[in-house]
Image (cartoon, rainbow, N blue to C red):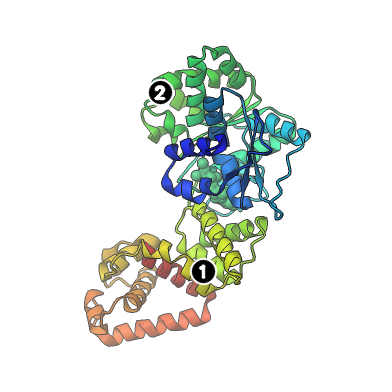
Amino acid sequence: MNIGQEVLKLLKEEITEIEYNRYIKHLTYDIEHSTSDLAIFYAPNALVSNWIKSKYREKIAHLFEIKTNMNVTIHITLQNNTNQPTKPSAKNSNIEKKTQHSMLNPSHTFDNFMVGGSNQFAYSAVKSVSEKAGILYNPLFIYGGVGLGKTHLMQAAGNVLQNQGKNVIYTTVEQFLNDFIRHIRNKTMEHFQEKYRKCDVLLIDDVQFLSNKEGIQEEFFHTFEALKGAGKQIILTADKHPKKIGGLEERLQSRFEHGLVADIQPPELETKIAIIEKKCEINKIKLPKEIATYIATVIDTNVREIEGILTKLNAYSQLMHVDIDLAFTKNVLKDQTESNKTDLTLDSITQSVSKDLNIKPSEIRSKGRSKNLVYARRIAIYLCRELTPNTMPQLAKYFGMKDHTAISHTLKKITELMRDDEDFKLKISELTNKITTN
Ligand code: ADP
Ligand code: MG
């Protein structure tokens, strides 16, 4: 086993099996061209390569350091067709070295970020900060669920500022903590402090992991104060609002809220479609609109899953020399959708409609005549008819309607609407996919 393989084996123990199989497994180490301070790995495509660069490069470098006691630059590059890897030129590897510890993914740009109602506020805030670093909102705190684009946005600002020559450090709290521990162990704390306190822009990702870790909170607080005092921009992200993080020193929590706190919500269907189309454009994947729409309806909220799906689709279509069509997509995504399938009942469908439209199940099943209620009830009835074996009289009973003619009337109405209103049709297919895949 060569050193590259040994390092990947160590990494395997630190990450989940899914992550390993999806990304790391596909790396090959170039033993011939690597040197004692430069490790070259090949990735099969841009998605895998970008992902590894943004998520694992520092970890890989660290593992090399542990194994070899050398500071190793990690170069992840695309496998070229001839399988004859070209060694990065000295110039390139210098660039890598220089930017290495800022760890920004170059494709995380504002241009590549699709804006919709769900992320408009966070987007505008980050964009403004990238134009007026250190002056406007400091710190800027972005919070929201997994895979909604927090890291992408914060790095977009980082890329802009770095291109202006600013010294940008991007780090997750986890890496910050590892770095801290490593420097304590090596008795090189001055280096640590200098590194973080001398930068112009500090991007700290996933600060919820500071929770209940007093030692690092203390260190982080001083870093924060030093940077803030010097008018340096700080951007933070977390999966929740600072108030909700818990296990956080009071003074840190109040610092976090001191600038601007902006949230990111799950993307609307149109934004999801736009994101998929953007990812395809970046990765040169040909995907018909119909498929983009289908994927958008199957993926609930986590945008990150989209990349995995596109990689998979692209790989299969290339391997099998077929175009990506709907039947093919459904087939490839079968595992994704089938493993999630649960038994559908009138209750569960009504629940899903209730959640999606924000109307209580009891109201959906009531005799209320307000527009919203009627709308939700019709949809619920239609989906129940489509997705369960219940008869019309059974449905009438469940939804408190007079008899089966009322149900049949509703179904007719929905069919008409779907024929005449493209958006409504989309809404129904979105709900159907959500219900059948959750
Ligand atoms: P988070 O940090 O919130 O967990 P990320 O920023 O890592 O999420 O985003 C996950 C993936 O989804 C990334 O590949 C990112 O580029 C992509 N993504 C998320 N939101 C958008 C968006 N609005 N436009 C384009 N890509 C997006
Ligand atoms: Mg993130």
**Local crowd size for mark 2, using a 10 Å CA cut-off: few (<14), some (14–19), many (≥20):** few
Front residue of this view, candidates 117 and 331: 331
Determine the CA span between mark 1 and mark 2: 50 Å
Residue 99 falls in image quadrant: top right
Q: Nearer the viewer, mark 1 or mark 2?
A: 1
Query: Can residue 377 be seen in this snapshot?
Result: yes
Residue 294 point in image, percent of width and height: 51, 68
**Local crowd size for mark 1, using a 10 Å CA cut-off: few (<14), some (14–19), many (≥20):** many
Residue 103 falls in image quadrant: top right
**Circle 1 residue:** 329
Query: Can residue 131 be seen in this snapshot?
Result: no
Q: Amino acid at mark 2?
A: Glu
Vertical side of 108 occupied by 221: above or below: above
* The disc label shown at residue 250, or none: 2
**Residue visible at 56% across and 57% down in the picture:** 311
**Residue visible at 47% across and 31% down in the picture:** 174
Vertical side of 45 occupied by 136: above or below: above
